[in-house]
Amino acid sequence: MNTTNTTQQTVRTRFAPSPTGTLHLGNIRTALFAWAFARHHKGQFVLRIEDTDLERSSESSADGILRDMAWLGMDIDEGPFYQMQRMPRYREVIAQMLADGRAYHCYMSVEELDALREAQKAKGEKPRYDGRWRPENVAKHGLKIPAGVDPVIRFRNPDDGAVVWEDAVKGRIEIANSELDDLVIARPAPVGEVGVPTYNFCVCVDDVDMAITHVIRGDGHVMNTPRQINIFRALGAEPPVFGHTPTVLGNDGEKLSKRHGATGLNEYAAQGFLPEAVINGLARLGWSHGNDEIFSP
Ligand code: GLU
């Protein structure tokens, strides 16, 4: 793995599961890489529970994650931090971004957004929010704030240039800013309040505040990364090194997931597997290390 940053700074990685089910071989493999990378570099490993999806998150799932990690011997240096307990911090950052123009209120309704998307698709364009509620466009088109609509808050994405990063697993990735629209960072709320912030925003504030140097996570997040890099920069922070690990597939070639065929780690424990054996199997999944089968964490 790319080790940029590792000489100057203490390596800090994190595992940031959403507590919406049990840990399985797919998500714990990512945690294993993040944990082992921190241990290898004599760094720190942080656990963050991303529980902002109130409908799907549960305390029992969060407790299960802690139990399973302890069973595997994946020791945590800091945390668990719970995102729901950090709401005042996110709101403070968003208020500051609104005040200095890095973010703005958008009153577009779901119907208008759908109509815009349909029109764009009909023209063969990629559906994207058109920035119509950016303050300069509001002034230009004389837009009137509709009555009774709670606005969302959008991040003002840079218009020009490209986001480029050297992914520690996948290599160089480049996405033009023209491909990215102004992301919703807070859900609808009356003006003067800040609604519940969204994943792509919270994750950046947390990674900055927790001084994470290496974000190691599943490759389902690759397309979130350019947006997050722009948010890191808007927060005045240097983005961490990103490494996106391949998805673990089941015997049927389908992605392992909480809803699809994944055996919970707790079930391996119940079947008598030793935690060392599970770690060993996971560590060797997807690459080869000669015929070595037994090695220490
Ligand atoms: N909470 C996210 C997930 O469970 C992880 C986000 C991240 O690692 O950046 O997929």
Image (tube, rainbow, N blue to C red):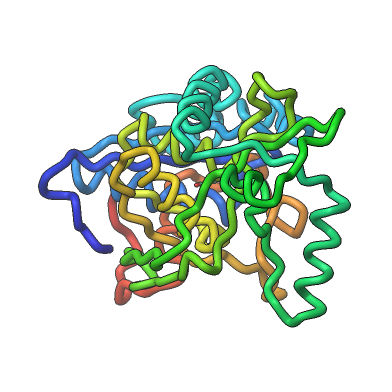
Is residue 272 visible in the rendered image? The answer is no
Which residue is more in the foreground, 252 or 204? 204
Left or right, residue 141 beside residue 219: right
Locate residue 73, reporting x and y percent.
Answer: 41, 36
Left or right, residue 123 beside residue 95: right
Which residue is more in the foreground, 148 or 205? 148
Identity of the residue drawn at 69% across and 41% down = 106
Locate residue 111, reporting x and y percent.
Answer: 88, 52
Q: Residue furthest left?
A: 7
Above/below status of 58 relative to 225: above
Left or right, residue 135 beside residue 188: left
Left or right, residue 222 beside residue 61: left
From the image, which quarter does the N terminus lie in?
Answer: bottom left
Locate residue 139, reporting x and y percent.
Answer: 63, 44
Which residue is more in the foreground, 212 or 30? 212
The quarter of the displayed image where residue 163 is located? bottom left
Identity of the residue drawn at 46% across and 70% down = 176
Locate residue 39, reporting x and y percent.
Answer: 26, 43
Is residue 50 visible in the rendered image? The answer is yes
Identity of the residue drawn at 42% across and 49% down = 32
Total labels: the figure holds 0
The quarter of the displayed image where residue 52 is located? top right
Q: Residue furthest bottom?
A: 124
Identity of the residue drawn at 74% across and 44% down = 143
Which residue is more in the foreground, 255 or 236? 236
